[in-house]
């Protein structure tokens, strides 16, 4: 709680200088986008190359807007802070829309819908009730942490800087369960050759891009580009490629 409060104070203090408007970005010709780069299959590195559903989608949106892209990668829990320091124009890093975050940034319309799910080693906890007395691993600063903390009776919640660290803690037996994105969890299960299993969905969420507050022109440009991509088949194609289904919110 203290950490969150501190982060919000920081965000408020540094937001005095204004962000680039859509006109200013257009004039420059290059939009600067930030993500984490460690959250497969949404934003991650394949060798040296930044890729994933959100990376491909944001590149497509930029193309639609007639812009070149410069990518910046940063730890997840500093992404919204950097946004409010004008280090980049927007963030696409699987942020669920929450009232707490809405105090600090503006969100676009959601670019996909998903949920947080339990993953455990085969034979481990699968339901919310099973989490009683268990150690759960989650990435810091996420809605997974927020929601696991609401589950009564959980033994211990361990936080890690990266979601992959939380996954490793589960695989190494330092945690009984890992709560993460349901699609990311499924990929990890597939890659684990029978070691991991999917448990219950803890909560559902709408995922959106974050823009600095009071930047209506950029927010509108992003929302318009997303609508266009969802109409012209670009979105469906990228979504199929990563998930074998269309993950847009309905
Ligand atoms: N969807 C979750 C949240 O809103 C997790 C996002 C994690 N993103 C990442 N790039 N690691 O907090």
Image (cartoon, helix red, strand yellow):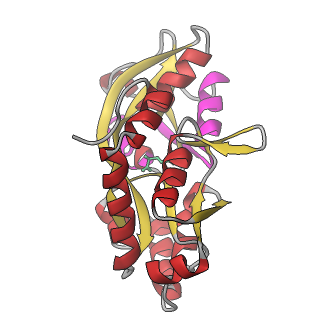
Towards the viewer: 7 or 75: 75
Q: Is residue 164 magenta?
A: yes
- Residue at image location 55% in from the left, 35% down from the top: 41
Please, which residue is most extreme toward the right here? Answer: 48
- Residue at image location 27% in from the left, 42% down from the top: 249
Q: How many tags in the picture?
A: 0
Towards the viewer: 78 or 156: 78
Percent across and percent down for residue 213 are: 38, 78
- Residue at image location 40% in from the left, 49% down from the top: 143
Quadrant of the image for the N terminus? bottom left
Quadrant of the image for the C terminus? top left
Direction from residue 219 to residue 28 in the image, left or right: right
Please, which residue is most extreme toward the bottom here? Answer: 16
Q: Which residues are magenta?
A: 145-172
Report if residue 25 is visible in the image: yes
Q: Is residue 13 magenta?
A: no
79 relative to 185, above or below:
below
Please, which residue is most extreme toward the left here? Answer: 250
Percent across and percent down for residue 76 are: 57, 55
Percent across and percent down for residue 108 are: 34, 62
């Amino acid at each position: 709680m203290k950490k969150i409060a501190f982060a919000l104070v920081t965000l408020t203090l540094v937001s005095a200088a204004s962000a680039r408007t859509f006109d200013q970005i257009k004039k420059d010709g290059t939009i600067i986008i930030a993500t984490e780069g460690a959250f497969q299959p949404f934003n991650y590195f394949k060798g040296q190359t930044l890729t994933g559903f959100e990376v491909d989608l944001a590149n497509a949106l930029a193309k639609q807007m007639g812009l070149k892209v410069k990518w910046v990668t940063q730890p997840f829990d500093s992404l919204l802070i950097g946004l409010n320091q004008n280090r980049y124009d927007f963030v696409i890093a699987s942020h669920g829309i929450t009232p707490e975050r809405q105090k600090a940034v503006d969100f676009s319309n959601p670019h996909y819908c998903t949920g947080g799910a339990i993953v455990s080693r085969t034979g481990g906890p699968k339901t919310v009730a099973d989490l009683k007395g268990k150690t759960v691993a989650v990435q810091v600063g996420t809605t997974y942490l927020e929601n696991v903390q609401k589950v009564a009776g959980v033994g211990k919640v361990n936080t890690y800087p990266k979601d992959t660290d939380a996954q490793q803690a589960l695989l190494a037996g330092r945690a009984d369960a890992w709560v993460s994105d349901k699609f990311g969890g499924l990929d990890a299960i597939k890659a684990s050759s029978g070691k991991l299993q999917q448990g219950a969905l803890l909560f559902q969420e709408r995922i959106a891009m974050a823009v600095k507050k009071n930047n209506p022109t950029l927010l509108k440009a992003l929302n318009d580009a997303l609508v266009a991509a969802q109409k012209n088949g670009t979105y469906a194609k990228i979504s199929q490629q990563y998930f074998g289904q269309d993950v847009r919110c309905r």
